[in-house]
Image (cartoon, helix red, strand yellow):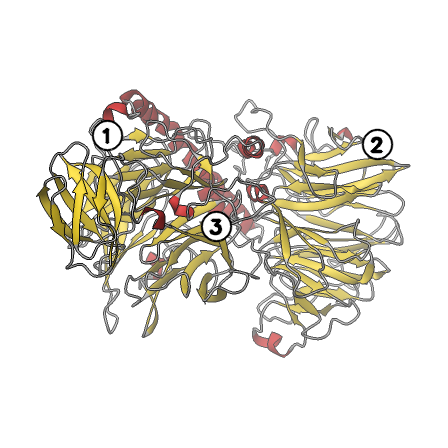
Amino acid sequence: MMLKLFLSVGLIGTSFLLNAQEVTKKEEIQNSKANEKYLKHIKDATQAFKKNVQFAKKHNQKPPNEYYLQDFIATMDPETGQVSNQNYVELDKRVESGTYRPEKKLKMFNGVNSQYSSKNINSLWVERGPYEVGGRVRGIMFDPNDVTGKKVWAGGVSGGLWYNNDITNATSEWVLVDGFWSNTTVSCIVSDPNNSQIFYVGTGEVETGDFSGLGIWKTTDGGATWQQIFNIENGYASNGVKKGIYNVPDIQVVNNNGVSEVYAGVAGTYLGDMSGNVSFAGVYEAGLYKSTDGTNFTLLNTLLSTTTQGYDIQDIEVGTDNSIWVSTRSSFVGSSSSGGKIFKSNDYGATFTNVYDVGNKNSRVMVEVSNTNPLKAYALLQGATNAEPVRILKTVDGGTTWISTDVAVSGITLPNPIDTGQPDNDFTRGQAFYDLVIETDPQNDEHVYVGGIDSYKSTDGGATWTQYTKWSNNNLLNAANIAGVHADQHALVFNPKNLNQFVMGNDGGIFFAADKNNLANNSAIGVRNKRLNITQFYHGTLNPTATFANENMILGAQDNGTRRLSGVPLANNFYTSSEVYGGDGAYTAYDDQGLYHIASYVYNNHIIFNAQGAYNLLSSSTQRNAGQFINPLAVDRNLDIAYTNANSSSSTSIVLNRISGLASVPLSLTRTQLTIVAVTAGEFATDIFVSPYTTASSTLFIGLSSGKLFKVTNANATHSTSQINFDFGGYISDIKLGASESEIMVTVSNFNKTSVFYSIDGGTTWISKEGNLPDIPVKAIFMNPEDNNEVILGTYFGVWGTANFQATSPTWALYSDGLGKFKVNHFDYRASDKTILAVTYGRGAFTTKIDNTTLATNETQQNSVANQVYPNPTRGPLHVKLANGKPVDIEIFDVSGKLVMTKKNIKSDEEFNIENLIKGDYVLKAIQNGNIVYTSVIIRK
């Protein structure tokens, strides 16, 4: 059965290319020259990342997430090698002022045309789930304005800023503040002790190398509106390093005799060359900053690691005597000895004393000060050497002397995990750079809570420990009567209105403990993730045999496996969520007849599920561990063949894995590799698209990171490769076809590049469709199968659409109501019920439906009023009357995109018959001299 993903129809006049904005040869030459710089930037970024991985392994740390490298390469300005996240801030202002308000209805959204408002979520897109999977949370705060102590604020590392009005209620749902927050990572949130309406949010997750930090944000009305107060980008250093405030791991506000003093810790970005020769942003702006007016910040010269640069700050704590304790982390400036230190100031930052130094400049340190005794403090940190992954400290004299776990019989010990898979001396399991939490009970500073993979509590000042959460039921954990809580702990916050309660943040979202004194049971801590949909999906696919009324879709998620959303819509419009496959999810695929589906783990670990069970597409572990971290996969549904990228970014050839026999019973897979073309290191496959139009063989379109596009014919056998003779100048993020292989759409995801290209002659000539589109990464494109003037884009700022794609310069607007201003990685389409799936990175899955009922008896909007088809609906007889009176060729397609009837040389107003077609909706195209001159939806009743 053939499934055509894109059937594009519409009026394309003979003067199209004369009026279009054809991309000039000059621009193409400029793109080609710029690619030399771009490839160098890709190599530099890849080299820097590899050094960071080596560094992490050498120091017994979890390597950084490779997806951040892929995303950095995909969005960087090819000319400068930098990203422009500050663009989102300025764009948000223009959007809120109405600059990109939709002025035309799109049939893709049921004809709805609602003005975008972040405060008025409505009907363009419907949120489908997952409902309570959650995601990584570092920043948590109880609302100081809620006298009941039930309202909690939390920020995801993607997915925005949220609040819950009753954290004590297991059914209470989270509320999204504003979709703009998807474009930045929330790392911390704190209130002003002198004005409970003022909050500060710090952004940027330095622990993982996320490059989406956007400084500090402030509200003066209890969270209703927010402003960026600590600006980011301020040019480049002489060696090309981007300057600015990108990572703010912690903020504290001190009441100095009625004056609110804000202390902000800043660290450099993770991506960087360990020699100091190559780094990307913010490494020279690290340090401790202070503001006395809540707006302007000054780097404290009292806490500098060099004459001009501050230490990379990890944590800030304030004692009851207003003493300020600051801990550090590693720096990626090679000359800096930043990490492993604790500083203390007794004079509001005028002077600082180094009260502890572990002697490891790469150590990440978390510090905690007693709420009742300003002289007592604890610290949790990476140890001095690889042999000591974790250390815990304690002082009772303000930091003059310390006891620590590296000294035998010191009076303080490390927790011993129940899980035998975790070392006795490392409850973070090698992830101290990533997950470290230490807090004391506000009422009793001998009660100490620490977290790594799991969580532990001491009631004797750290002398002994009891584990009170478990991430799984592995080995001995199965018998432990303690709560199941997601792994990787990042935050623990006590309720100031009810000190028996606390909230935890980890990679699984938010968890709530109702009674700190009763933790020894499996229900002591409950999950609180309802509607906290901050799931980071890379890719997703609709089951072609399902319907929106009884759905079945699978999506690959960061750290939350491959999720299935299925069944009938629940009362809240979400679908039921379940897990298909664990670990990191990636690309997905469905057979068009429901015989199999494919889930993916990282690299080339692709698993096919059919009636017999689950099997790896690739038998060799070497092959499965090759390719990109999130690796392109495409399936030819006609021939049941899978194609995956086989090579890494440093390879000098494009190679595909070809796996045939996907629908065989019993399953019998044939595995071969195709060498497509030789390339330069840094050029790699970014998208693979299978043409639905070539049914007897596989025709592939392959886009590269360098902006090259290749067409591979007969890929199922002895293949032939040809390069589309055009340089797109950047990272090809998506390739789609319109009505045939002659109509091609290509998107480029880099900042500062033309993002949308269109060809109607198979790639011989290309037209820019940028129009008024702002400078944001574009990751996906979709054309209305029944009106090629309607196109939507998935971007890093929501969904943008146009009703005049065929115009010389299309007018783009934000069609993102319901979905918000979030990162959209992918679109999928099911023709049978006209459902569109939007896959977001940080807000789960959304769908919408194309509604062409308004066109059932009328022509598409771009057609001349003199053109008409009648009778419509019809039992068989049909007439097509054209204004120019010339004969036409007629093509009729069913809703799956299959060509079901052709009529040649039909005179204007001549009757012909479609009674042999089954009842249903169809699309009619009238063609003169190879050009579509008229289209209409027709109904056979």
Q: Amino acid at mark 2?
A: Ala
**Which label lies toward us, 2 or 3?**
3
Instruction: Say which quarter of the image contains residue 750.
Output: top left
Tell me, for residue 350, which label it has, or none.
Answer: 2
Can you give x and y, in whole percent of width and height, for residue 196 in the image? Answer: 80, 44
* Distance of label 2 from label 1 (alpha carbons): 65 Å
Q: Which residue is mark 3?
A: 125
Answer few, some or many: residues within 10 Å of disc 3's Cα (few below 14, many 20 plus, some between 14 and 19): many
- Check the image and report above or below for 766 versus 574: above
Residue at 10% over, 42% down: 906
Q: Is residue 414 left or right of residue 21?
A: right
Answer few, some or many: residues within 10 Å of disc 2's Cα (few below 14, many 20 plus, some between 14 and 19): few
* Distance of label 2 from label 3 (alpha carbons): 53 Å
Can you give x and y, in whole percent of width and height, for residue 640 in the image? Answer: 24, 61
**Which label lies toward us, 2 or 1?**
1
Tag 1–tag 3 contact (CB < 8 Å): no
Q: Amino acid at mark 1?
A: Thr
Instruction: Decide if residue 14 is in sight here.
Output: yes
